[in-house]
Image: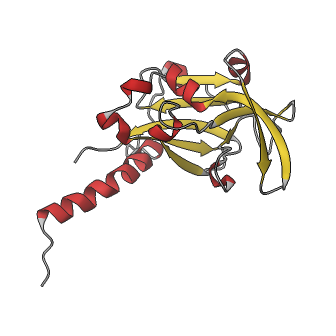
Amino acid sequence: MFAPSHSSVRSTIAAFLPVLAAFLLAHPLSSTPQTPTPALATASASELRINGAVATPLVLSVGDLKKMPRKTLSVLNPHDKKNETYEGVLLAELLQRAGVPQGEKLRGPALATYVVAEAADGYRVVFSLAELDSGILDSDVLVADTLDGAPLGGQLGPFRLVAPHEKRPARWVRMLKSITVVTAAVQ
């Protein structure tokens, strides 16, 4: 009979923990409803929530994004085979406002942090925090609120995550509703 060593069991569990943590954030085990923080209590379909392992949870409207530093990206949408111009706020800027470590503060255990972006229809994607930090990589991941100068329509918005430097738009998230920051468990 094969009996796995303690170290192989620990490494298997450690590999599974980030997935479990993301699941538990989305599906609490409690049978009683959790009371949201005051900032999150008012969130609606037209707002974007940034929460999880952040110093300051945020609930943002399109109007809030309009007041922040803006970026415009022209990209080729591989699905539609046409050039599109998106405008919005870099995801790194939003994470900075939520108090997520960046720049020189992004080191050591903080490098095991990841971001789960979720759409209203349940579609989810993951980015490592390092992928979003301009001190490490120029990813230009954008939380867009306009397409070709017009507000994003119901099938795309009001927010869309655009990752312009990827070969496939698999991590472009339409109808973006939340960004959850998760710190991977330490072994």
How are the residues colored? secondary structure
User: How many tags in the picture?
Assistant: 0
Between 92 and 123, the one lying in front of the other is 92
Q: Quadrant of the N terminus?
A: bottom left
Measured along the vertical axis of the image, is residue 125 above or below residue 150? below
Quick one: which residue is furthest to the top in this view? 67
Between 116 and 120, the one lying in front of the other is 116
- Residue 35 in picture, x, y percent from top left: 45, 28
Measured along the vertical axis of the image, is residue 174 above or below residue 159? below
- Residue 80 in picture, x, y percent from top left: 84, 55
Relative placement, left or right, of 94 versus 176 is: left
Give the residue displayed 45% in from the left and 47% down from the top: 27
Relative placement, left or right, of 128 versus 66 is: left
Q: Quadrant of residue 47?
A: top right
Q: Quadrant of residue 114?
A: top left
Relative placement, left or right, of 146 versus 111 is: right
- Residue 108 in picture, x, y percent from top left: 30, 35
Relative placement, left or right, of 71 versus 36 is: right
Whether residue 71 is visible, yes or no, is yes
Whether residue 45 is visible, yes or no, is no
Give the residue displayed 77% in from the left and 56% down from the top: 78
- Residue 84 in picture, x, y percent from top left: 83, 42
Measured along the vertical axis of the image, is residue 127 above or below residue 73? below
Give the residue displayed 55% in from the left and 29% down from the top: 92
Q: Quadrant of residue 183?
A: top left
Give the residue displayed 48% in from the left and 44% down from the top: 26
